[in-house]
Image: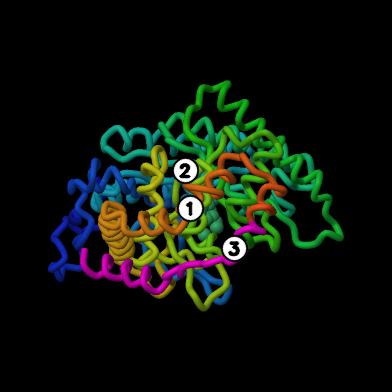
Amino acid sequence: MREFFKDIPKIQYEGKDSKNPLAFKYYNPDEVVGDKTMKEHLRFSMAFWHTFTGTGSDPFGTGTMLRPWENTSNAMELAKARVRAAFEFNEKLGMPFFCFHDRDIAPEGNTLAETNKNLDEIVSLIKELMQQSNIKLLWGTANLFSNPRFVHGAATSCNANVFAYAAAQVKKAMEVTKELGGENYVFWGGREGYETLLNTDMGLELDNLARFFHMAVDYAKEIGFTGQFLIEPKPKEPTKHQYDFDVATVLGFLRKYGLDKYFKMNIEANHATLAGHTFQHELHFARINGVLGSVDANQGDMLLGWDTDQFPTDIYTTTLAMYEILKNGGLHSGGLNFDSKVRRASFEPVDLFYAHIAGMDAFARGLKVAYKLLESKELENFVAERYSSYREGIGKDIVEGKVGFKELEKYALENSQIKNTSGRQEMLETILNQYILEV
Ligand code: XLS
Ligand code: CA
Ligand code: CA
């Protein structure tokens, strides 16, 4: 069988003193942290769209990527070569999962029926390669945004024919995800949003989006798809106002339409920062509401206001992310999917390996630091102490619902000399730094 990454060996763990750029310094899949191995904690996944269909093009120039599989003009042959290269890539990296959009893996035909036929052909190749390896599907999804038919959105399009087409596409993508044993199915908003209210019936669009999700839930039941449904919030890009702005917005939407028990969130770091939140905020908010499902691992750029999808290398952020994930009891059926792309100037195939190694090491290190930090309870004890006034006296009465405004007024009149204590932010940041530097 053709080898696509000829000069790349299987990537091994060599430890922190290694100078080999094609080795893990921190990610040691079999190392046990707490009750699980690193591999089980992290559940790393490759994103097919960036790593195997990304070209490096930007609004100012065409693609730059040199890819060993790009040597045929036949779209189906190219699709098959990509899939084979992807399995070789995951094998060499020891990457247990992958994710895809329907249109990443197979080209569109002239009709929907032809497109579905192309998809079936590639899916059976993927199935065969999955059987020969231990590589699994973390999630599947449908691309409801690239084709010009989705110019006004998909489930929120003003055109009912587009709604129907999108439904047919998601139906098929769910079937394919089930067939490949996918553990989750993702809905990212794509073009579900709007540019101007001058031409938009927002009420109808949101009702339709909810109708669409209910149809998906019903169809999953019908075909026996038991994977977790995930919604991936994003505040802007491509539309100015994306309906799935952030975790809080999506939760409000799901609850309004009685959908909350069927969905969790797929939280992307770069989308969190675009929404004006930290990655940790979104993970934390999802966690305390019981909807932290999976993660799209990447990072944005502090100086750029768009979705740069860079590989995650910031240990501070990966540590705080893993802190939330550990407190969530792990990601369960979710994982850490590298929805990240190598920079346009990192155009050689080997850069794909360097990039994924960088991300895997950053999360492995983050996991170890977060585990130690949690074990020590330093932060948790501080927070518990900070809120201790709610465990006794009037605070306890408030929490237990024993008092109202009248009782509280009486109490305040008798206790109006208030004494606060310091929040100690800088001291806590030093503790975090100590763990990051010393673990
Ligand atoms: C785009 C999104 C997309 C989803 C899957 O910004 O991140 O790639 O993850 O459709
Ligand atoms: Ca994403
Ligand atoms: Ca993104």
Looking at the image, tell me whether mark 2 or mark 3 is earlier in sequence order.
3
Asked if ligand 3 lies within 8 A of label 3, the reply is no
x 46%, y 60%: residue: 54
Label 2 Cα crowd, 10 Å radius (few <14 / some 14-19 / many 20+): many
Report how far apart the C-alphas of labels 2 and 3 lie in the structure: 19 Å
Label 2 secondary element: strand
Image coordinates of residue 387 in percent, x first then y, are 47, 55
Report how far apart the C-alphas of labels 1 and 3 lie in the structure: 15 Å
Report how far apart the C-alphas of labels 1 and 2 lie in the structure: 12 Å
Q: Tell me the magenta residue range.
A: 412-439
Nearer to me, 131 or 21: 21
x 25%, y 56%: residue: 372
- Horizontally, residue 350 falls left or right of residue 61, namely left
Specify whether residue 102 is in view: no
Using the rendered view, name the quadrant where residue 10 is placed. bottom left
Image coordinates of residue 92 in percent, x first then y, are 23, 52
Nearer to me, 384 or 137: 384
- Horizontally, residue 214 falls left or right of residue 312, namely right
Instruction: Provide the residue designation for mark 2.
Output: 293
Label 1 Cα crowd, 10 Å radius (few <14 / some 14-19 / many 20+): many
Instruction: Provide the residue designation for mark 1.
Output: 284
Nearer to me, 224 or 72: 224
Label 3 Cα crowd, 10 Å radius (few <14 / some 14-19 / many 20+): some
Instruction: Provide the residue designation for mark 3.
Output: 275
Looking at the image, tell me whether mark 1 or mark 3 is earlier in sequence order.
3
Using the rendered view, name the quadrant where residue 310 is placed. bottom left
Q: On residue 312, which mark appears?
A: none
**Amino acid found under the numbered disc labelled 2:** Gly
- Horizontally, residue 292 falls left or right of residue 18, namely right
